[in-house]
Image (cartoon, helix red, strand yellow):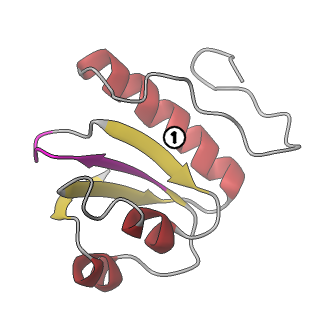
Amino acid sequence: MRGPYSLDASRIDLLIIPNHPGVYGVSNVNTCPDYIARSDSDLNISLKHWIGKYKFFWYEYAMSSKDAYVLECQTFHKQKDKSKLENNFHPEPPERTGLKCPICGGV
Protein backbone atom coordinates (compact mmCIF):
# COMPACT_ATOMS: atom_id res chain seq x y z
CA MET A 1 0.00 0.00 0.00
CA ARG A 2 1.01 3.60 -0.50
CA GLY A 3 1.87 5.58 2.59
CA PRO A 4 2.12 6.46 5.35
CA TYR A 5 0.42 9.84 5.06
CA SER A 6 -0.97 12.18 7.72
CA LEU A 7 -4.61 11.39 8.32
CA ASP A 8 -6.34 14.70 7.76
CA ALA A 9 -9.06 15.87 5.36
CA SER A 10 -6.81 18.06 3.21
CA ARG A 11 -4.27 15.25 2.70
CA ILE A 12 -7.03 12.75 1.90
CA ASP A 13 -8.61 15.14 -0.63
CA LEU A 14 -5.21 15.78 -2.18
CA LEU A 15 -4.37 12.10 -2.60
CA ILE A 16 -7.61 10.12 -2.83
CA ILE A 17 -9.93 10.38 -5.82
CA PRO A 18 -13.56 10.31 -4.63
CA ASN A 19 -15.90 7.47 -5.62
CA HIS A 20 -13.20 4.81 -6.00
CA PRO A 21 -13.07 1.52 -4.10
CA GLY A 22 -9.91 0.50 -2.32
CA VAL A 23 -8.15 -0.84 0.74
CA TYR A 24 -6.67 1.18 3.54
CA GLY A 25 -4.80 0.88 6.78
CA VAL A 26 -4.71 3.33 9.68
CA SER A 27 -2.40 3.67 12.67
CA ASN A 28 -1.08 6.04 15.31
CA VAL A 29 2.51 5.22 14.31
CA ASN A 30 3.99 5.61 10.85
CA THR A 31 5.65 2.19 10.67
CA CYS A 32 2.75 -0.12 9.76
CA PRO A 33 -1.06 -0.15 9.85
CA ASP A 34 -2.83 -1.25 13.02
CA TYR A 35 -6.22 -1.60 11.36
CA ILE A 36 -6.96 -2.86 7.82
CA ALA A 37 -10.25 -2.24 6.02
CA ARG A 38 -11.75 -1.58 2.61
CA SER A 39 -14.21 0.71 0.95
CA ASP A 40 -16.40 -0.87 -1.71
CA SER A 41 -17.36 2.48 -3.20
CA ASP A 42 -15.55 5.57 -1.84
CA LEU A 43 -12.12 5.34 -0.25
CA ASN A 44 -12.06 9.11 0.31
CA ILE A 45 -15.15 9.10 2.54
CA SER A 46 -14.14 5.92 4.36
CA LEU A 47 -10.75 7.34 5.33
CA LYS A 48 -12.30 10.55 6.66
CA HIS A 49 -14.27 8.46 9.16
CA TRP A 50 -10.97 7.74 10.97
CA ILE A 51 -9.79 11.36 11.35
CA GLY A 52 -9.13 12.06 15.03
CA LYS A 53 -8.96 8.35 15.86
CA TYR A 54 -5.66 7.62 14.08
CA LYS A 55 -2.76 9.76 12.84
CA PHE A 56 -1.59 7.97 9.66
CA PHE A 57 -3.04 6.11 6.71
CA TRP A 58 -1.98 3.87 3.84
CA TYR A 59 -4.09 3.09 0.79
CA GLU A 60 -4.40 1.19 -2.46
CA TYR A 61 -7.07 1.62 -5.12
CA ALA A 62 -9.08 -1.30 -6.47
CA MET A 63 -11.00 -1.67 -9.72
CA SER A 64 -14.18 -2.98 -8.05
CA SER A 65 -15.58 -4.05 -4.70
CA LYS A 66 -14.60 -7.64 -5.55
CA ASP A 67 -11.02 -6.58 -6.25
CA ALA A 68 -11.04 -4.53 -3.04
CA TYR A 69 -12.06 -7.63 -1.09
CA VAL A 70 -9.24 -9.71 -2.59
CA LEU A 71 -6.72 -6.94 -1.86
CA GLU A 72 -8.07 -6.52 1.67
CA CYS A 73 -7.65 -10.26 2.31
CA GLN A 74 -4.09 -10.22 0.97
CA THR A 75 -3.20 -7.16 3.03
CA PHE A 76 -4.93 -8.52 6.15
CA HIS A 77 -3.00 -11.80 6.04
CA LYS A 78 0.31 -10.05 5.30
CA GLN A 79 -0.09 -7.52 8.13
CA LYS A 80 -1.50 -10.10 10.53
CA ASP A 81 1.69 -12.13 10.11
CA LYS A 82 3.91 -9.05 10.58
CA SER A 83 2.19 -7.34 13.49
CA LYS A 84 -0.78 -7.49 15.80
CA LEU A 85 -3.79 -5.92 14.13
CA GLU A 86 -6.48 -4.21 16.17
CA ASN A 87 -9.08 -5.80 13.92
CA ASN A 88 -8.12 -9.44 14.06
CA PHE A 89 -11.35 -10.67 12.45
CA HIS A 90 -11.18 -11.91 8.87
CA PRO A 91 -12.55 -9.54 6.18
CA GLU A 92 -16.11 -10.23 5.03
CA PRO A 93 -16.79 -10.42 1.27
CA PRO A 94 -19.13 -7.95 -0.43
CA GLU A 95 -22.76 -9.02 -0.13
CA ARG A 96 -24.13 -11.57 -2.61
CA THR A 97 -20.79 -12.24 -4.30
CA GLY A 98 -19.97 -15.70 -2.98
CA LEU A 99 -16.31 -14.71 -2.85
CA LYS A 100 -13.86 -16.60 -0.67
CA CYS A 101 -10.50 -15.46 0.61
CA PRO A 102 -7.75 -16.23 -1.91
CA ILE A 103 -5.31 -16.87 0.96
CA CYS A 104 -7.17 -19.15 3.38
CA GLY A 105 -10.44 -19.95 1.59
CA GLY A 106 -12.50 -18.32 4.33
CA VAL A 107 -15.44 -16.03 3.85
Q: Is residue 46 left or right of residue 103?
A: left
Is 87 located above or below residue 23 in the figure? above
Tell which of 96 and 104 is nearer to you.
96
Q: Is-magenta flag for residue 28?
A: yes
Tell which of 51 and 31 is nearer to you.
51
Q: In which quadrant will I find the C terminus?
A: top right
Q: Position of residue 52 (x, y in %)?
A: 24, 62
Q: Position of residue 32 (x, y in %)?
A: 19, 38
Q: What range of the chain is rendered magenta?
A: 23-31
Is 38 located above or below residue 70 in the figure? below
In the picture of the structure, the residue carrying the numbered disc 1 is 72
Is 39 located above or below residue 87 in the figure? below
**Secondary structure of residue under mark 1:** helix
Picture quadrant where residue 36 is located = top left
Q: Residue at x 67, y 60 (%)?
A: 64
**Amino acid type of disc 1?**
Glu
Instruction: Confirm whether residue 3 shows in the render.
Output: no
Q: Is residue 72 left or right of residue 75?
A: right
Instruction: Confirm whether residue 78 shows in the render.
Output: yes
Q: Residue at x 28, y 85 (%)?
A: 14
Report the number of numbered marks: 1
Picture quadrant where residue 76 is located = top left
Q: Is-magenta flag for residue 63?
A: no
Q: Residue at x 24, y 84 (%)?
A: 10
Q: Residue at x 23, y 73 (%)?
A: 8
| Extreme-left residue of the structure | 30
Tell which of 61 and 84 is nearer to you.
84
